[in-house]
Image (cartoon, helix red, strand yellow):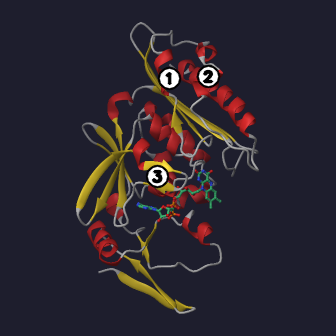
Amino acid sequence: MAQALFGASFRGAGFLYLKPKTLDEAVSLLGSSGGQILAGGTDFYPALGDRLPASRVIDISALGEIRGISTESEHVRIGGLTTWSDLIRAPLPRGFDALKAAAREIGSLQIQNRATVAGNLCNASPAADGVPPLLALDAEVELTSAAGRRRLPLAQFLAGNRKTLRCAGEILSAVLVPRRMEQAASAFLKLGARRYLVISISMVAAVLEADAAGRVAEVHVAVGSCSATAQRLHELENDLVGLPAKPGIGASVRAEHLRSLSPIDDVRATADYRRDASLTLVRRALEACVGSR
Ligand SMILES: Cc1cc2nc3c(=O)[nH]c(=O)nc-3n(C[C@H](O)[C@H](O)[C@H](O)COP(=O)(O)OP(=O)(O)OC[C@H]3O[C@@H](n4cnc5c(N)ncnc54)[C@H](O)[C@@H]3O)c2cc1C
């Protein structure tokens, strides 16, 4: 049974805190009378500021069944409640190096110990560091509700700045990463105004697989913080296929390859700087992939 650990009334608006113990219980609570999902709370609480939650809070942090990483025949399954620290510690093939590098860049160790993969995706910030590596890995999300489960490509799930295609009664129960490119080289680079505890000005993830002849067989490149949602650079990816997968590959990336990005001017950087920096990061990420083959 979900425990009502805390009930209170504030200026006439009652709210309730519930902590279900199973996924079934959590989705049935959400389906019956709604509520806001709380996982690690590292985005949830800062977004509240000094306000109280407007509706009841369903704390899903006790749902052990959706925490952890397992390898299935077609996918690596990352439970939604898996923390960034869990991910860093997990033995994963080299295709996941970019995702691990992104995890190490998320906040501080304390944040990585609390913050979850699903929270990063559902918060849908343009600067979410987990998104570019998961886009580059062709990840899908699994959404569970009282009505059942559905799967969506992550690229589709992220519908805009702070917008996703999650329906009210759904919990992001897992991220599914196809194993097809799990042995590919991968790299993640993040640029911020300082080295640690910083929101990205731009970040880039690349996953590159070479064929037996040492040419690019398949490559995926995603850029974050330069549009409402992180973007794959499909035109660049197509142009790189067949090129020698060796140092110097970065020179094949031209500014036009980044034209699908729509960076903005804000307190962290100008749009021009973001474009320029992203071009350099894309080149360096590709060099890192071929350098580590
Ligand atoms: C000091 C600090 C530094 C940070 N640094 C970074 C950084 O460098 N890079 C970065 O990308 N982020 C950073 N963050 C943001 C945050 O830590 C991450 O986005 C984190 O992964 C969010 O996970 P959470 O479990 O804390 O989510 P929560 O705060 O619990 O939830 C976030 C949102 O997702 C929803 N949600 C959570 N889990 C689920 C689920 N399973 N299903 C459906 N909806 C769900 C919640 O309802 C809420 O709307 C930072 C935050 C802080 C406070």
Counting labels gives 3
| SS label for mark 2 | helix
Q: Position of residue 66 (x, y in %)?
A: 34, 58
Q: Residues within 10 Å of mark 1 (few under 14, many from 20)?
A: some
- Judge by depth and name the residue closer to the eye, 207 or 262: 262
Q: Which residue is identified by label 1?
A: 235
Q: Quadrant of residue 261?
A: top right
Residue type, mark 1 in image: Glu
**Marks 3 and 1, how far apart at CA:** 34 Å
Relative height, residue 11 to residue 277 (above, below): below
Q: Which labelled disc corresponds to residue 256?
A: 2
- Judge by depth and name the residue closer to the eye, 263 or 107: 263
Label 1 beta carbon less than 8 Å to ligand 1? no
Please identify the quadrant where the N terminus is shown. bottom left
**Marks 2 and 1, how far apart at CA:** 9 Å
Question: Tag 1 or tag 3, which sits nearer the N-term?
Answer: 3
Q: Position of residue 255 (x, y in %)?
A: 65, 23
Q: Residues within 10 Å of mark 2 (few under 14, many from 20)?
A: few
| SS label for mark 1 | helix
